[in-house]
Image: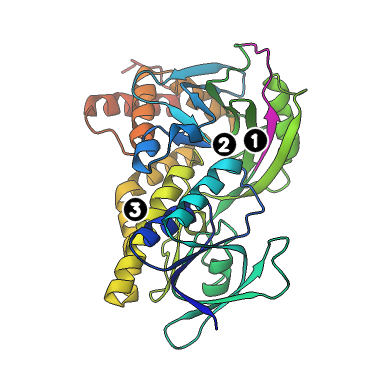
Amino acid sequence: MRKTYDVAVVGGGPCGSMAAERLAEMGHTVALIDPDNRIKPCGGAIPSRALADFAIPESQLVSRANAARIIAPSGRTVDMTIGDIGFVGMVDRATFDPYLRNRAAEAGADRLTGKLDAIEDDGNGFLDMTITSTERDGGQEPIRILARRVIGADGANSAVRRLMFPASRKPPYVFAYHEIVESPVAKDPEIFLADRCDVIYDGKISPDFYGWVFPHGGQTSIGTGTAVKGHNIREATTRLKQAAGLGDCRVIRREGAPLPLKPMKKWDNGRNVLLAGDAAGTVAPSSGEGIYYAMLCGRLSADAIHQSLVSESGKALAEARRTFMRAHGRVFLILGIMQMVWYRNDKFREKFVAMCADPDVQRLTWESYLNKRLVRRDPLAHLRVFAKDMAQLFGIPVGQR
């Protein structure tokens, strides 16, 4: 007899784990399927509000960042200090993801350690799923389950999307790569600080994205991403390590994966399958931020699945995307335009870094990032930023009429 579930959640990252936890708390029977054998390459940054929004204990943070250093192709640096409005929390996905999966299990979800191999509609209101165990002692026989609804939260190369949606339903992405190294004991504050995130805009590091050096306490994430074929991001990461004074630090692990940068126009099939998180493309353009949005998407997907089960209708599944885009669609649009305009070449990257030195830009950037919404309370600041933005874009000296 195959075990039957209300919902099967494929993927146990921040999105899938949050969805499984919420659905279990609502009283649904839930299977959380994850191979539990890989770590996604990720800078690990989350805004301080995420701790309150998702009940994340501070013990999950490996460090706090109170500032960012923006570095131009010329080597010019601009320091952006957060101040007293919050901080950037740093998590290590090697420990953070298992913590979230354990939370889902404690809420009542069944953990199935394996990868999805097949899924099909059985014609009786259930999806028939075949899972290959990835546990060392899991045996050779595949796991077979039935589920009334499925959430595909299994990343940019989603098996759920590949098996249940047309090949054209795939968001654009960059390929991200990073190395986790041991942080140095002796540090030069002009090169490396344990409470500062360095963001590098340089065509040699990435011709269309950026590089990063994000301290994680005793470890540091160093990486970059690009959609340009032929650009060697491993060599770029080596240059980043050397520039940050970390070239001699021991490498703990290396990881690479695609990173989607645009939400899909439709996340569900209108019946019984809903994509979420990276599988649906909910990573912010320009910044590549994904953890907060993934956890939120997991919550919203759980709510949509719940309503779909209660109403016995697939139409409710579309509410997950509608709610997400109402809250964050405008931010994603602006970030996408910003990436298209300012990341195109080093001349524009240089102007972009210069613009980051402006106090209005810094304040609005941090307030928007930490609060996860566009700041509306100071319209004059937005006008000033827009005027300076246009001045940088067209090379007009600020103040010239």
Q: Is residue 206 visible?
A: no
Q: Amino acid at mark 1?
A: Gly
Q: Which residue is mark 2?
A: 43
| Depth order, front residue of 325/153 | 153
Q: Position of residue 113 (x, y in %)?
A: 61, 62
**Marks 1 and 2, the one that precedes in the sequence:** 2
Q: Residues within 10 Å of mark 1 (few under 14, many from 20)?
A: many
**Contact, CB < 8 Å: mark 1 with mark 2?**
yes
Q: Which residue is mark 3?
A: 325
Q: Amino acid at mark 3?
A: Met
Residue segment shown in magenta: 177-188
| Depth order, front residue of 113/125 | 113
Query: Cα distance, mark 3 to mark 2?
Result: 24 Å
Q: Amino acid at mark 2?
A: Gly
**Residue 202 vs residue 21: left or right?**
right
**Mark nearer the viewer, 1 or 2:** 2
Residue appearing at x 38%, y 74% in the figure:
270
Residue 181 vertical placement versus 136 (above, below): above
| Depth order, front residue of 288/311 | 311
Q: Which residue is mark 1?
A: 223
Q: Position of residue 197 (x, y in %)?
A: 54, 25
Q: Residue furthest bottom?
A: 123
